[in-house]
Image: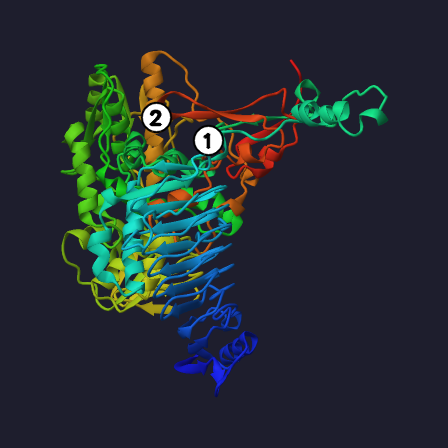
Amino acid sequence: MGQSKTLKISGREGAIRLESSLLESLIQRAIREGYRSIEVEAYGQHGIGGRLWRAGNEPVYVRITGSTGQRVGSMGFPNTTIEIEGPASDDVGWLNAGATIIVHGQATNGVANAMAQGRIYIAGDVGARAMTMTKHNPRFEPPELWVLGGVGDFFGEFMAGGKTVICGYESGYENVLGYRPCVGMVGGEVFFRGKHRGFSEADVLLIDVSDADWLWLTEGIRRFLQAIRKPELFSLLASRKDWQKLRARKPFEKLSNTRRSMTAFVAEVWNKELDGGLLKDLLNEERTQIPLLPSGDLRRYRPRWDNEGSIAPCQSACPTGIPVRKRWGYIRRGEMEKAVDIALQYTPFPATVCGYLCPNLCMQGCTRTLAKLPAIDVRVLGKASLTAKTPTAAAPTGVKIAVIGGGAAGISAAWQLFLLGHEPTIYEQREDIGGKITASIPFSRIPGEIIEQELARVRENIPYTQLLLDKEGFAKLQCENDFVIIAVGAQKARRLRVEGSELALDASEFLRRSKGGTLEIGEKVLIIGAGNVGCNVASEAAHWGAREIMLVDVQKPASFGVEREHAEAAGAKFLWPKFTQRITKQGVEFTDGSFLEADTVVVAIGDTPDLDFLPPEIATKGGFIVVDGAFRTSAARVFAIGDVVRLGLLTEAIGAGRIAVRAIDDEIKGRNETYDQLPPFEPTRIHSEYYPPAHVTLDSIDANAHSCFSCGSCRDCGVCVAICPEGAIERSELAGGEFEYHIDDNLCIGCGFCAGACPCGIWQLEENTPI
């Protein structure tokens, strides 16, 4: 670990000024000796504070007093903070690779020249050619330059990435952008405030400051003012109407295309020189142009813009079929409401399930995990979906459908029927709908008000009634409705066939009593069955005062995800393989002769459906209803979904409801539709180097949206246009703000650069078979 005290280093020895290299060696030696706080009295030495890599990841603070020379913080490392107590000379932060540099005064020319990472804060104006030739590796955060005043001439020249904020406060310049700003700029953004005299319109666009921009900007202004010790200016600078934004034009937005095709080069340069230049008298042979690389029908390959021509792995992994990729795309375009609202077309529980209860199979399928990056966190978007607006239902069809069961599967089916204009009614044996979501899932997993708000949306649109079903009641529902959907779930607890089994509680009963009243369970709780339900029991047992919690199983526990994490956090221990032989009032005896004491024993080995109400014509097997791929039973116009068919996840039950309703709707409308027939996206098409790296925190909706690989869906970045050597790719605007890219076959040589560079894997190379 580094030294906690501050080491003071002087830039002179007696009356003699130290050379820059000698002063740097003293600073480097201090770092090697473990000092992490250094105060330098400078006398014009160059490069102070740069290249302090020997500190590793430990933070280093360098305070500079006196007169600094050029290149303060040059090649600075991410662990370094450099604070200059006064003005600074040329090239502050030259080739900065991550350091934070604070200048409490003016800075001269070349600030942030060729910077690639880090932040530079200037408490005054800067000179000419600031932020020139900057870079932005998308695997890291973009470099930032913050200027309290204005910038000098040729600002942003050949800028290729990063963000600059020019506050225009008490600037010594009447023109806060200087003369000829942003010439040759090809990447990055500039936020500025104050008067200016134009910019290179061929290279940059003046656009509005978006909501996301303003959030980033206000947070950054507060941090910047704190760093330069002027927090009192926040109210002055935080007026949105005063700010404007410049961004680099994308390749297809350039006002002029200076690329010259080979044909044009031959006609305008080569032949012109040969016909009238110095070589005219030396060449008598006939000149025939032979194409080096063929185009058109002679190409071996041709690229195809395969935008959204495949299903992204996240959507493919989601049993409910939610178009996750499309939702993140909406957010990147600033259409947050669309991203939120679209979820209700697929599930009535976008917040409850996607935000809290689902093990998030979409995240498990995320392509980012193959690149050893964290999966996009769909949970933040799920939680935001609580405010989703109910879609407008289709025109009424008059078709009546009975949905038996008010749990996740039944509500999902009823919701889809409602959206299609049919008339569903939910029949539930309990007083209210919700099923196991409300009855058995602990409050530690999800706040009760979240579930209630989403159930209220269902109640507003779908009628439900309490009904204890028997054979006669089921027959009546068949007669009174055009279709019946069975979604009664699995309500009967599986019992252990061992002596003393009546002394144990079943898991469902335990969880219901835990949510609805009080429990006296003692200090020692033993749970037979170490799946996710058993883990929920363990978490609740800790809530009711248990101090020793043991989960036993006949095999390696199948529990995973949040349930397992909560159980382990509650102090639960897992033991396997253990086969129960006898349950007593003192505990559980196992077949290997061991005995574990317990005040309460809970059996969590699963549930089975209660099918006593079924007529004989509906086939069952192993205690579950037999269905086909669309969840049709053996009886006409009777469908079955959810745990009554097979035990599974909430999201699988919701997806089953959607599939069954599509089949019902097809039958009503006399059609035979196929769904989700697009091929799966191949993750090897992604080029992950274009995206933020692993250390970028996915702690907000915006961060997730911009880190999404957008597998197979074009992000409109224009990389393909920029990289095409023949200028064969063009972008066209379509109605409704949509767009498309297309190939000029007469120019395209089939080189595959577009496919090789596309971050999202849109371009596909195919064998060129002329028609």
Nearer the N terminus, badge 2 or badge 1?
Answer: 1
| Amino acid residing under circle 2 | Ala
Pointer 2: residues within 10 angstroms few (<14), some, or many (20+)?
many
Left or right for 22, reference 637: right
Q: Nearer the viewer, residue 492 or 65?
A: 65
Closer to us: 128 or 567: 128
Which picture quadrant has residue 617? top left
Tell me residue 59's x, y (percent). 42, 70
Q: Nearer the viewer, mark 2 or mark 1?
A: 1
**Residue 771, image x, y percentages:** 64, 13
User: Is residue 50 left or right of 103 when viewed as pictured?
Assistant: right
Is residue 487 in sight in this rendering?
no
Distance Cα–Cα, label 2 vs label 1: 47 Å
Q: Residue furthest bottom?
A: 14
Q: Which residue is mark 2?
A: 660
* Residue extending furthest toward the top: 670
Q: Identify the secondary structure beneath mark 1.
A: helix
- Which residue corresponds to the image point at 41% horizontal and 72% vertical from the top-left? 61
Color style of the picture: rainbow
Q: Nearer the viewer, residue 562 or 471?
A: 562
| Figure quadrant of residue 272 | top right
Q: Residue 657: x and y, percent?
A: 32, 30
Looking at the image, residue 273 lies above or below residue 191: above
Residue 186 in percent (x, y) is at: 49, 41
Asked whether 493 or 158 is in front, the reply is 158
- How crowded is the residue under tag 1: few (<14 C-alpha within 10 Å), some, or many (20+)? some
**Residue assigned mark 1:** 253
Q: Amino acid at mark 1?
A: Glu
Where does the N terminus fall, quadrant-wise?
Answer: bottom left
> Is any part of residue 710 visible from this angle?
yes
